[in-house]
Amino acid sequence: MDPSLSTSRRAKAPPVTGGGDWPAWVPLLVLLAGSALARPRLPAWVWMWTLASALFWGFKWLTWWRAGRGDRQRSLAYLGLWPGMDAARFMDRAARPPQPTAAEWRWAVTKTAAGAALVWIVARAAGSGLTAGWIGMIGLVLMLHFGFFHLVSVAWRRAGVDARPLMHAPLAATSLLSFWSDRWNRAFTDLARVAVLRPLRRLLGAGSATLVVFLFSGVLHELVISVPARGGFGLPFAYFVLQGLGVLAERSRLGRRLGLGRGPAGWLFTAAVVAGPLFWLFHPPFVRRVVLPMMDALGAL
């Protein structure tokens, strides 16, 4: 997951400071400690969102701190009104992002509405089992990450802020590297670049640092999936280990010879590695103990 190989336009890389930036980590540690203390009083799905929120806001602060912070108005907007993690890009007042078209506005609204329909209409028709849970998860991702967050991106770019969409046609990816580094959830890619990849790349080399990024992702997903579900431990971590090994295989001499990073072969390889073991990532204990109770609370079942 080496975002430096991405072909998309990049903002100037934020400075990464040394051990003197320990205040950047304090909010994350405090928020996680508070989440742990709240666990006995919260339903599993509420605690999952509490953990996810603690990680999100803690890492938002980290990326903002390491980007050199910036002026107050843009900093508050980045910390509170944008789900992305590329602080340097968002706070660059000299940036001139491409203006969204009317078609892009309509497309973002359509995805938001389609996701909501999956959650509150299609999932209800599917009953209350694993199928309904999976439909609900797909609907939430479509409604939030692909839809609502795209609307937020469009609004910010209309205002002249360089806030690129978090999702960038992931189904069109013809390589695992492209999928994970520039097409799926760019917020995590930007976070990993600042918190993990750039500090370790010089020390470990590109390949090993890339694998560490996937291990980092596996740990985070264990925390917000398996821990609230109290089951399925190790499966999300194994999923991201497989993704990391897949990227390394794709970039190997044999992988390049087989065309795994391009064209139809690359697309099929990416689809198989990403989608094939998805039940490891969102395992049945998580769907039954977290997703379905959450959907019930939302009135979707």
Image (cartoon, rainbow, N blue to C red):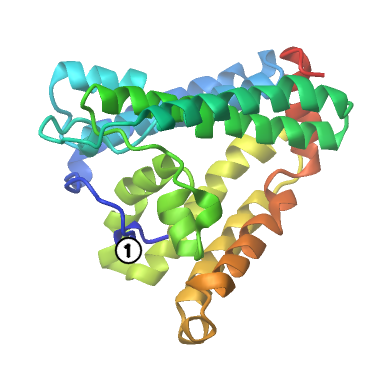
Rendered location of residue 98, percent (x, y) = 25, 37
Rendered location of residue 263, percent (x, y) = 51, 72
216 in relation to 297, above or below: below
> Which is more toward the observer, 237 or 40?
237
Look at the image and tell me in which quarter the N terminus lies: bottom left
102 in relation to 281, above or below: above
Q: Which residue is mark 1?
A: 5
Residue 83, by quadrant, is: top left
> Which is more toward the observer, 236 or 153?
153
Rendered location of residue 243, percent (x, y) = 56, 61
Secondary structure, mark 1, is helix
- Residue at image coords 49%, 87%: 257
- Residue at image coords 13%, 29%: 93
Residue 120, by quadrant, is: top right
Can residue 51 be seen by looking at this rendering? no
Outermost residue to the left: 94
Image-based side of 269 in relation to 106, left or right? right
